[in-house]
Image (spheres, grey):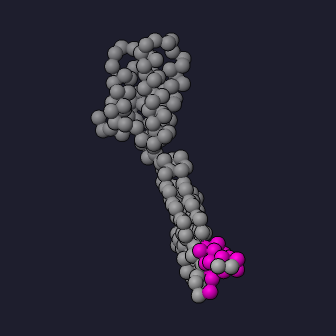
Amino acid sequence: MNREQEQEQEQGRGGGPAGPGRPASGSGGLFVGGSMTGGAIATGADARARDRSRRGGERPVDGLPAPVAPSGARVPGEVHVAGHVTGGAVAAGEGSEAEYAAVAADRGHRELLEAVRLLRQHLGLLSVTDEVTEADGELAAVEEEITRTGRADPGRLARLRSLLTTGNTALTVLASAATVVGAVTALTGG
């Protein structure tokens, strides 16, 4: 095979224009007929699309412009989204790969996370005792878990609620502790 034939074969694999009688693999385009407020889209021979964002739940599409249809002829291999992209991953073409690994906390977990952070600030104002240290450790674990995964383990939440509601201590009289207990109860139902 001469150099010209090698180039022609390479181009037919998506590296450029198609070889004689062959379409270029991975050819195509992308059209989003609405808005893109999150996510990842890639096209091309070695396309990769990833969305690993930390999100606060679903993004509303109310108030976004109405989607529109593409003008002109459709291109083979084209990705067409006739609406709004608020997350996710799309990849088109040879060697494509799409990954959606975003962490989205629901409203209840977001509210709990805010309450946990406030209570941890308030604990810093108290004298350091074994009870305060244990509560802060459990709060830190809940905060890390929600931040990392968008959720908290129900068993961990039950332990946290128990720490904040039992005994006759300074923890039980903090308004921020009551807020955390309320958020935990709302999530676990008990």
Direction left: furthest residue:
190
Name the main secondary structure of what is drawn in magenta.
helix
Query: What is the number of callouts on the image?
Result: 0
**Rendered location of residue 24, percent (x, y):** 60, 78
Q: Is residue 119 above or below residue 76?
A: above
Q: Is residue 19 above or below residue 82?
A: below
In the rendered view of the protein, which quadrant contains the C terminus?
A: top left
Asked whether, in this view, residue 16 is left or right of residue 37, the answer is right
Q: Is residue 2 above or below residue 34?
A: below
**Rendered location of residue 109, percent (x, y):** 43, 41
- The magenta stretch is 3-20
In the rendered view of the protein, which quadrant contains the N terminus?
A: bottom right
> Residue at image x 33%, y 30%?
158
Direction right: furthest residue:
3
**Rendered location of residue 97, percent (x, y):** 52, 62
Q: 51 or 17: which is nearer to us?
A: 17
Examine the structure image and report whether residue 59 is included in the region drawn in magenta: no
Direction bottom: furthest residue:
21
> Residue at image x 46%, y 12%?
129
> Residue at image x 55%, y 70%?
93
Q: 25 or 40: which is nearer to us?
A: 25
Q: 101 or 129: which is nearer to us?
A: 101
